[in-house]
Image: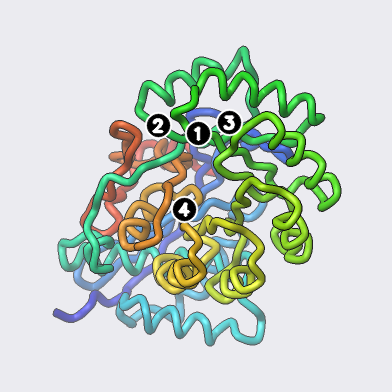
Amino acid sequence: MPSPTITAIRTRAVLAPLPRPITTAVAAIEKAPLLLIDIETREGVVGRSYLFTYTPLALAPLSSLIRNVGDSLIGKTVDPLPRFAELTGMFRLLGRQGLVAMAMAGFDMAFWDALGKSCNRSVAEMLGAAPMPLPCYDSHGIFDGQRDRALLEQSLQEGFRAVKFKIGNGTDGDDIRALTEITEIAGPEVDVMVDYNQSLRTPEAVRRIRALEDRFDLAWIEEPLPAEDYAGYQTLRSAVRTPLQAGENWWLPEDAARAIGARVSDHAMLDIMKIGGVTGWMRAAPLADAASMPVSSHIFVEASAHVLAATPNRHLLEYLDVAGGILAAPYEITRGTLTAKGPGLGIAWDEKAVTRHAA
């Protein structure tokens, strides 16, 4: 059966409502700036994906880039691999990070969605796997005891056996007080992880992490240093006991290969938008597997549920729902797990919500 042929590419910007603000050591996000992509085909299938730009300032330039690139794709099929190779060549001289990599991933995810719909199969099935209940961790922001105690208790009631909180916005004492309350509420059966969001430098990271290790048994410590500081991560890994998590800011499989080869972390957390969509993920994840690194996902719960199902060294899916407010049927947690839906990526827009939250 021939693959669908592209006839039009449409983008729309929204500021999607979040269940709770995303608060970190470096910024707070009240609404999710998302760019929605619709790839229309001659056969009537529409491939969909969305991109999370972190700041509304990037929505317009990313939209323009996708529309401009999209003009060169009209009349071609949605086959993801040749299209990924074509886009790689198109940006070889410019370089493929930032908005370029995001655009490539947006196209790739929409291509896979369209291809799956044309075959009435989920993307997970197209990758040789099957949708399955994936263990998740609930992803929280900076912990405030008065505000967030009930949210953490709700996470536990929903069956999450792992939770993550942001830290690093205050002193060592602030982090210790927050984690003391978090671990008391969570209890010994729930894994607790923390995320510094790249806010430290190596000497401070060594000191602060050692202070935490004296008091808590954390499952991992995420991105204490800037993602590009490979030397700092190597120093830090030799100085602390707690496993380090990194990867959400690795751009495309080539970046993952460099970071994994440098042994900057014990775990790999791939962001399907930054790693190059479904195609990029399926090239990067085996690199982590070869290095005995468990792979978890970063946001994008819908697409991540498909690729994690096809990842032998999968660990945890991060449950941080940035798009549920504009989806017709948001993905839902069942006893702390999430299962991919189909056909394709199993996403459709709630058009009334898209109009209501247009940016």
Could you tell me how far apart the alpha carbons at marks 4 and 1 are, in whole angstroms?
13 Å
- Residue at (42%, 51%) from the top-left corner? 315
- Residue 121, disc: none
- Residue at (44%, 78%) from the top-left corner? 84
Q: Is residue 298 left or right of residue 279?
A: right
Mark nearer the N terminus (4 vs 3)? 3
Q: Nearer the viewer, mark 3 or mark 2?
A: 2
Most distant residue in the top direction: 146
Residue under pointer 2:
160
Q: In x, y percent, where is residue 14?
A: 50, 45
* Type of amino acid at the residue the image marks with label 1: Val
Residue under pointer 1:
163
Q: Where 193 falls versus 288 (above or below)?
A: above
Viewport quadrant of the C terminus: top right
Mark nearer the N terminus (3 vs 1)? 3
Mark nearer the N terminus (4 vs 1)? 1
* Type of amino acid at the residue the image marks with label 2: Phe
- Looking at the rendered structure, the secondary structure element under dot 2 is loop
Contact (Cβ within 8 Å) of mark 4 with mark 3? no
Mark nearer the N terminus (3 vs 2)? 3
Viewport quadrant of the N terminus: bottom left
Contact (Cβ within 8 Å) of mark 3 with mark 2? no
- Looking at the rendered structure, the secondary structure element under dot 3 is strand
Q: Is residue 171 left or right of residue 167?
A: right
Q: In x, y percent, where is residue 272?
A: 47, 60
* Type of amino acid at the residue the image marks with label 3: Pro
Contact (Cβ within 8 Å) of mark 3 with mark 1? no
Contact (Cβ within 8 Å) of mark 2 with mark 1? yes
Could you tell me how far apart the alpha carbons at marks 3 and 1 are, in whole angstroms?
16 Å
Residue under pointer 4:
296
- Residue at (49%, 42%) from the top-left corner? 358
